[in-house]
Amino acid sequence: MAVNDKVLPLLQQAPLFEPLDDADRRALLQEMRETSFDAGQVIFTRGDPGRDIYLVVSGRVRLSVLTAEGRELSFAHAEPGAVFGEIAMLDSGPRSADATAVVKTQALSLGRAAFMRLAESRPHLVDAVVRFLCRRIREADQQLEAIALFPIEVRLARFFLAAARQKDPDATEGRVSIDLGMSQGELALLIGASRPKVNTALSMLESNGAISRQGNKFSCDIEELSLTAGVE
C-alpha cells in the first residue's frame, strides 16, 4: 500500500513493531494491504487457517471463544494501533479465537511470507515477537486471575483504570475522561459477567464517585478506582 504518514504512529505504538525505525516501518507498510469490515462481520473463526496478521487503523474488533455450552467469552478488544491474528500467522496453525468487527473497522493486513522476509533482514523484529507473545501470556494470566478471584466491581474498576491509564499514562490522581465505545453487553463479555450484574456494579462505582457516566462517555476518578481495584 502507499505509505500514509497518518498510519506510521499506529505502528510506533504497536508493541510488535515498536523496535523498528521509521525506515523499517515504511518498508512494512509497503507490504501491508488495506482491508475493511462492516459492523458485526466475522473476520475469522477459531480453527480457520490463518496466514495474516492485522493492524487496526480505526474501529474495534472483538476477540472471543465459544464454550462447549455455546457461551461466548470475549477476552479482548483490538482498538486502533492493536495487532491481532499473530499466533496463526507465526506458527501457520489454525486460528485460536474468533475475530468479529464490533463497529465498521479499517485495518491493514500483513501475510506470513512478507513478515518472514522482513524478519530475516531485521533480527530485532524476532526479539520483538518474543516480547510481544510473553506480554500476551501475562495479560491472559491476569485476566483469568481477575475472573476467578475478584468480584465484578473490582474487575470493572481495573478495566476502567487500565483504560484511563492508557489514555493518560502519567495520571496518578484527578479524573480522566474516556469514551468506552462499546455497549454494556460487550463490556459484560469482556469481564466475564452478565449484563444485569455489570449494570449493578456500574451503579456501585458511580455511587462511590469512582466513575460518572453519560452514555458511553465516562469520567474516571483515578484514586477511587485504584482503591476499589486494590492497586496502586
Image (cartoon, rainbow, N blue to C red):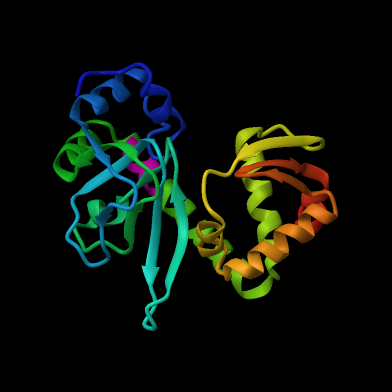
In the foreground, 60 or 20? 60
Q: Which residues are magenta?
A: 125-130
Does the magenta stretch mainly form a helix, a strand or a loop?
A: helix
Farthest residue toward the right? 208
Residue 3 sits in which quadrant? top left
Q: Residue at x 19, y 30 (%)?
A: 31
Question: How far from the left and from the top, in percent, is residue 81?
Answer: 42, 35
Q: Residue at x 29, y 42 (%)?
A: 54
In the foreground, 220 or 1? 220
Q: Is 128 within the magenta?
A: yes
Q: Residue at x 47, y 55 (%)?
A: 76
Figure disc tally = 0
Q: Is 208 within the magenta?
A: no
Farthest residue toward the front? 215
Farthest residue toward the left? 113
Give the vertical position of 73 relative to 41 (above or below).
Answer: below
Residue 68 sits in which quadrant? bottom left
Question: How far from the left and from the top, in percent, is residue 90?
Answer: 25, 52
User: Does the rendering let one see residue 27?
Assistant: yes
- Horizontal side, residue 106 vs residue 174: left or right: left
Give the vertical position of 157 relative to 52 (above or below).
Answer: below
Question: How far from the left and from the top, in percent, is residue 230?
Answer: 78, 59
Give the vertical position of 134 relative to 179 (above or below).
Answer: below
In the foreground, 201 or 93? 201
User: Does the rendering let one see residue 232?
Assistant: no
Question: How far from the left and from the top, in percent, is residue 161?
Answer: 69, 47
- Horizontal side, residue 227 vs residue 188: left or right: right
Quarter of the image where the N terminus is located: top left
- Horizontal side, residue 150 vs residue 227: left or right: left
